[in-house]
Image (tube, rainbow, N blue to C red):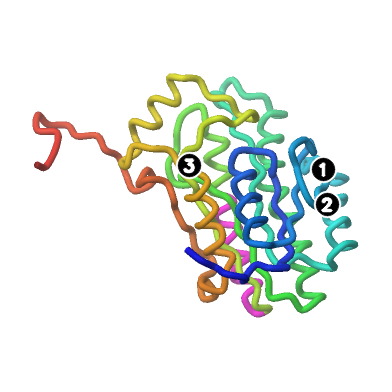
Amino acid sequence: MNFEDEFKGKRIVITGASGIIGQMLVDHFVAAKAEVCSTDESLEDLKNFSVSADLTTDLGLKKLLDAVETKWGAPDIVINNAAIYPSSFLLDMQVSDWDEIMAINVRAPFVLMRNFALQMIKKGVAGNFVNISSGAARKMRRTAVTYCMSKTALDRMTKGFALEMAEYGIRANCLEPGFASGSAVSVLNQEHLDRVLAAIPLRHEINSEDVGQAALFLASSAAKNITGATLSVDGGNSAGTMDVYQDKKSAL
């Protein structure tokens, strides 16, 4: 998909920029000539305008918000990508672990959406938000219950903000990328990797083009009448299960 110079000079905030999905997003928006503010807890490998911030804390959130307001006044696009994916049974989980997941996966996007939206309104920017969700928002799994809940909450919150911000011309949507291995934040074992890939109808994990092009679309004028929606780019994984409980395993 060719967006020509649509994003040239656009001011874009991307959280979780050091992660697998974050790097894909940064690369595509930089290639599209956007001005990108990359943020993560560590600044290693981050380029351009970057802010090191712990988004689980009020201090870290304020640091990012203030840095963007000082440099730009308001962003044009905000991509809430930062998230963690720990594995634990609920009966084993500590309250502190629950709090950490909800802090980064739900609370941080709320604070950033609210405050960046206020910056946009103040500056008359008809911006938009792309929140990185997951098929886990609709598909519960043991040992990932808290993560699934956090993504369901993010999906509902995105729709709520979309309704409230519509009168200001500000859009909000969710993007659900499919499976991408290799995260340093949430390490997955080989058994997990094999089982996940086997359950994807199209049988392959997503790549940079899948994520980048989908995000560019949602952030572009091509999606000007799309808000409160969710775009799944997951090889059909969220559509349902490939299990067949009969002797004949394929239609043809």
Q: In which quadrant will I find the C terminus?
A: top left
Which SS type dominates the magenta stretch?
Answer: helix
Which residue is tagged 1?
A: 53
Q: Cβ–Cβ below 8 Å for labels 3 and 1? A: no
* Residue 172: % across, % down: 60, 65
* Residue 175: % across, % down: 52, 54
Crowd around label 3: few <14 · some 14–19 · many ≥20 (10 Å): some
Q: Residue at x 71, y 41 (%)?
A: 103
Q: Quadrant of residue 203?
A: top left
What residue range appears in magenta?
A: 153-167
Residue 136: which disc? 3
Q: Amino acid at mark 1?
A: Ala
Report the front residue among 85 and 95.
85
Q: Is residue 176 above or below residue 247?
A: below
Which is in the foreground here, disc 3 or disc 1? 1
- SS for tag 1? loop
Q: CA distance from mark 3 to mark 1?
A: 26 Å
